[in-house]
Image (cartoon, rainbow, N blue to C red):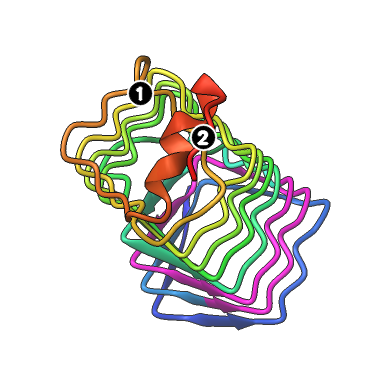
Amino acid sequence: MNEYYDSETFNKASLTSEELSRTDFDSCIFKSCNFSDMHIVNSEFLECEFIDCNLSNTRLKESSFKDTHFINSKLIGIKFHEIDPFLLQINFTNCQLDFSSFYQLKAQKFQFIDCSIREVDFTEADLQQSYFDNCDLLGTIFETSNLRSVNFKTSRNFSINLETNQLEKAVFSKDNVINLLDKYKIKVE
């Protein structure tokens, strides 16, 4: 039988070295909680907020995140491609997502605001209409990714191959569009 929580606030809960399985959270708030190295399996988060939480190296196997927002949280090394993609919608504000993977994930209309997204794998991800606002994308991989209508206007340190990614209607600024030429090793003065 599934456990169910509705409109609850979890404050400073430390759930490390445990497994959370078949648990549903609806409109819950997690504040300063530690989920690092935890296994979250077959659980659902609907309209939840994670504020100042640590989910580093957490396994999210077959769990779903619908209209979920992470704020000021660490999500280092997360394999987002293992989550349930049905009705998936996540937004990130001031989060650290370094070394995570969105491989082949349909992540349309995601918002990444003021995030560190270093060494992240977006290979074959569908990021249509997503928004990267003031994000550091150093070493991040975009390979055969769908980046149609993605807004990179205020982001930096990205390297996107024009030949292997779909970039129709993607938005860049005059200052950062030069990053699209990295592959060609040309000098612009």
The residue at 58%/65% (across/down) is 95
Q: Dot 2, how many residues are within 10 Å of its Cα: few (below 14), some (14-19), or many (20+)?
A: some
Query: Residue 32: percent from the left, percent from the top?
Result: 68, 79
Of the numbered discs in the image, which one, if any, rests on residue 159?
Answer: 2
Queried whether the magenta region covers residue 32, the answer comes back as: yes
27 versus 66 height, above or below = below
Q: Quadrant of residue 34?
A: bottom right
135 versus 171 height, above or below = below
Of the numbered discs in the image, which one, if any, rests on residue 115?
Answer: none
The residue at 57%/24% (across/down) is 185
Does residue 32 appear to the left or right of 121 in the view shown?
right
Discs 2, 1 touching: Cβ within 8 Å: no
Amino acid at circle 1: Leu
Query: Residue 67: percent from the left, percent from the top?
Result: 31, 60
Q: Residue furthest right?
A: 17
Query: Residue 4: percent from the left, percent from the top?
Result: 44, 63
Bounds of the magenta segment: 30-57
Q: Quadrant of residue 147?
A: top left
The residue at 64%/59% (across/down) is 96
Q: State the residue in front, 62 or 68.
A: 68
Q: Secondary structure at mark 2?
A: loop
